[in-house]
Amino acid sequence: MDAPAPLASLAELCAAPVTPAERAAAVRPLADTLGVMLAGLADPRAADLAATLGLSAAPGRARLPGSDLHGAASDVALMAGFAAHLLDFDDDETEVAMAHLSAPVLGAALALAARAETPVAMLLDGYVTGCRMMLALGSMANPALYRAGWHATSALGSFGAAAAAARLLELSPAQAAEALGLAASGAGGPRGAFGGEGKPLQVGLAAANGLRAAELAAAGWTAAPGALFGARGLLGRMTSDPLAPLCLPGAFPPPGFVTKLFPSCTATHAAVAELLALRKEMAAPAEILCALDPFVPAILIPGLPTSPEAARFSLAYCLAVAARTGALGPEAFEAAAFDADGPRVPEIRALMARVRVTADESLPRGPSGIATGAVVTLTAPDGTRLTGRREAAPGSAAAPLTDTQLAEKFAACLAPVARPSEVRALWQRLLSPTDFPSAGALLDALPLALTDRKDPR
């Protein structure tokens, strides 16, 4: 049976050419995501998940990058996607997919690349292909899907993972269409999971679901024609609105791509960056006023956070830490920084109580209809005020990170698992990935962040 028209177009997208420029543009996101993934694998919760999946040091199956553990490719994809998203330090796309692209897509691609002698160029092509898929589906379903309460990283990530896997498995367009249809049977993930460990888990599940769907399609499995589109198709049911016409994405990376500078929700980044800039003139504000797009508070979590996961979605916490310390790095989200009553540091809790959030309709909006900028006003103890406006998050197309910032982030991620000199050398090698004889050789160069002995070193 022929695939429905949108599905046929998406299936063709799985084999569409990737330009040399796109391949080159994918290098830094790949390296950045590998660093974030290794930081996630060093977290004890990664060892817990690996134990539940039965990953072991016994060879012969797919190897989890950054570890000496092996398992089914779908389980390795689950681990890689989970670890890449665990610290909320992975890149984001705020306008069309409204999702973190790299974690679910690379979760699947890395699992397959770690199982065979895949050329690095093919890994990069699979990555770009998966990102394109998420953007194409986002053009049809968003912003309705996101506003309806779905975590687009998980919901669309299943299809991004399926597309990346289809590319690496070299599926035909007909098989790719079946893979996308089969992936619909496992796609999901609510925004209600924000603030808990279910959020990174559902991203890992998306990576595993998409990869497994592609493997089953390769084995001859078929999906119902209406699984993804149509009156009872997944996307229409998720949005409860008619889907927009399919808009195939332009060149990678898309305009809404954000490489994260802080390990917190992207909605906090412009405000934190502006506060840090203002802090150079007012180091100890008594009060903080932050104006955001009216929809943004619905993404964030109010109140005193009692865990790192909740704190990443607490604007007041992120601003208070940045104001007090002059930074917002991984150390701000360590488990030891919280107890059952909230942040342990009294000064941070006190300043959080003096953070006010208001709405600003004047901040510029893109296709998502949600502005990512912020206006921040600091008030000194003597009543002096200082105001700044930032319309783009650091790491976005309008405010890209410098090479130094990217290298420093990579170093911060790998600090628990490698020596500084090793980290610097690895970063430089990852910036020339095609120098590796294969993707497997590239992944073998990563330090061990998770071992069968649960020893992060």
Image (cartoon, rainbow, N blue to C red):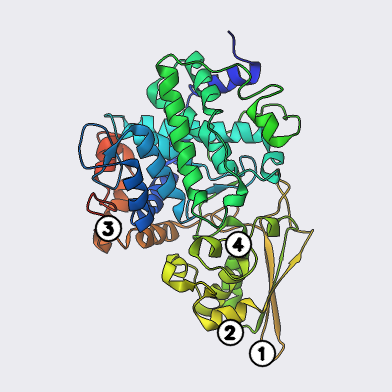
Q: What element carries label 1?
A: loop
How far is the residue under mark 4 from the one under mark 1? 24 Å
Residue 111, compared with residue 280, is above or below; it is above
How far is the residue under mark 4 from the one under mark 3? 30 Å
Q: Do the residues labelled 2 and 1 touch (CB within 8 Å)?
A: yes
Label 4 or label 3, whichever lies nearer to me, is: 3
Residue 239 seen from this side? yes
Residue most extreme to the top: 1
- Counting other residues with Cα less than 10 Å from the Cα at mark 2, is it few (<14), some (14-19), or many (20 or more)? some
Label 3 or label 1, whichever lies nearer to me, is: 3
Q: Along the horizontal axis of the image, is 245 left or right of 54?
A: right
Of the numbered discs in the image, which one, if any, rests on residue 268?
Answer: 4
Image quadrant in which the N terminus is located: top right
Q: Which amino acid type corresponds to the residue marked 4 in the rendered image?
A: Thr
Q: Name the residue under label 3.
A: 456
Q: Are marks 4 and 3 in contact (CB under 8 Å)?
A: no
Along the line of sight, which residue is nearer the eye, 405 or 304? 304
Image quadrant in which the C terminus is located: bottom left
Q: Do the residues labelled 3 and 2 touch (CB within 8 Å)?
A: no
How far is the residue under mark 2 from the one under mark 1? 8 Å
Label 3 or label 2, whichever lies nearer to me, is: 3
- Counting other residues with Cα less than 10 Å from the Cα at mark 3, is it few (<14), some (14-19), or many (20 or more)? many
- Counting other residues with Cα less than 10 Å from the Cα at mark 1, is it few (<14), some (14-19), or many (20 or more)? few
Q: Name the residue under label 1.
A: 381
Q: Name the residue under label 2.
A: 284
Comes first in the chain, label 3 or label 2 = 2
Q: What element carries label 4?
A: helix
Q: Which amino acid type corresponds to the residue marked 3 in the rendered image?
A: Pro
